[in-house]
Amino acid sequence: MKFYMLNDGVCIRLKLFGEDIKRLLANNNWKETCSEKADYIFINSCSFLLSKEKEFLRIINKQNERKKDNQKICVFGCLPSTNQEKILEINKNVILFHRNLDEIKDFFKLDKAKIGISHVTSRKLSASGRIIYLINKILKDSTIEYRLNKEKVFHLKISEGCLGNCSYCSEKFTTRLKSRKIKAILADFEKGLEEGYKIFALNADDTSVFGLDNKEDIYSLLSRINSHKEDFKLAITEFNPFGLLDKRIFSALNSKKIIFITIPVQSGSQRILDKMNRPYDIKEVIAIIKKLKEINTNLKINTHIIIGFPGETKEDFKKTLDLIDKNIFDRIKIFQYNDRPGTKASFMEQKISEKEKQERFMRLKRKIIINFAKKGDISNILVNCLKIL
């Protein structure tokens, strides 16, 4: 069999899942080819944002219009779990898979050979990415290397799914928490060291709850990784703030080898966080983040902010602006809220207008640029400025 896969425009976790599928097919003697010659066209899909859902529906429709009668389309990832009806409106014969490798193995009657998590193929850098990449030849910042040059990063997928119940998120409908065993992760880690990798990343939908389904935990994993004497750097994705409340976090992140962590706080307003069903006190989280940066000066902290959540008042938004002014984050990604199918937030009243959301987005963006300028953070100034232009 011959296959073609579209594996771009999705989060790193889904991209890694796409790479798993590629290796599974290759291990069963399938050949990767161009879309015109493929028997099956595989499309990885995201539905985290409404804009992403629309983008992937357009991609599916475009492939459906181009395909030959004997070709079949397979869509996998998050969209089949959150809005399969929209996919089947395009073509009722599209084959749908979720985030489950066994589904694909069983459907095609494949042998599930061992899948080694290692690297992903990077897309061509954007204009801002190329500029920052050139600047980093002088700065030699390993966190920038991690963010821009994914092929030099050894990705360790430690789990999928989460235990959260955020009122705005539809991703919780796509998969349940399923953690790998620490022993298996360490074997992959040691393989990466042997292959000469210097930057590693722990990838999960929520790294903070890793292992809670199999009597292990993220702190034990970090302790084992940090104990290695080799020269390497480690990045941690999607560490939910309530995971910071465990006192072990200070010893776990004290290692100078840990250079980057994403802690998605989402809002500076406790009232909005409560409506989002985010179970933490923002003041306590801020205090912990400040202490983490004191004990590990190498650590860069990335966060996510959602603006325009239903019922977000001007005072709530001001608290988010005030949070940015605390200068505890080294990278900030902003999302404008939009309804996702089946979520509690989609039924909430007091929706914020698109115009107001855009105005708040621009105000927050300007605030971020000004604060990074004060710190002399050239790379983040360029990232934020060039994405506005």
Image: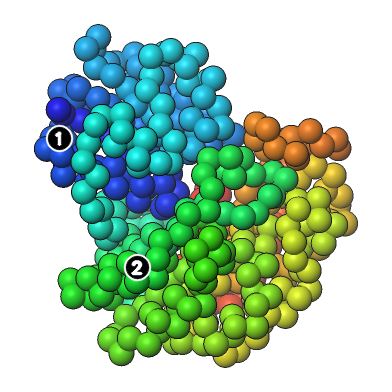
Packing grade of label 2 (10 A; few <14, some 14-19, many >=20) is: many
Residue 252, position as x, y percentages in the image: 52, 82
Q: Kindly identify the amino acid type of the residue bearing the numbered disc 2.
A: Ile
Q: Answer yes or no: is residue 81 visible.
A: yes
Extreme front residue here?
215
Q: Which mark is residue 84?
A: none
Q: Is residue 341 left or right of residue 35?
A: right
User: Image point 68% across, 32% down: which residue?
Assistant: 342
Q: Answer yes or no: is residue 382 visible.
A: no
Secondary structure, mark 1, is loop
**Mark 1 and mark 2: span between their CA atoms?**
27 Å
Packing grade of label 1 (10 A; few <14, some 14-19, many >=20) is: some
Task: Judge whether 344 appears above or below 290 on screen.
Answer: above
Residue 71, position as x, y percentages in the image: 24, 17
User: Image point 28% across, 42% down: which residue?
Assistant: 21
Secondary structure, mark 2, is helix
Residue 318, position as x, y percentages in the image: 82, 60
Q: How is the image coloured?
A: rainbow
Which one is earlier in the sequence, the residue at label 1 or at label 2? 1
For the image, the number of numbered tags is 2
Q: Is residue 270 left or right of residue 191?
A: right
Residue 181, position as x, y percentages in the image: 40, 66
Q: Which residue is mark 1?
A: 30
Q: Kindly identify the amino acid type of the residue bearing the numbered disc 1.
A: Trp
Q: Is residue 182 left or right of residue 324?
A: left
Query: Residue 285 or 307: which is nearer the viewer?
Result: 285
User: Image point 55% across, 64% down: which residue?
Assistant: 212
Q: Quadrant of residue 367?
A: bottom right
Q: Which residue is mark 2?
A: 185
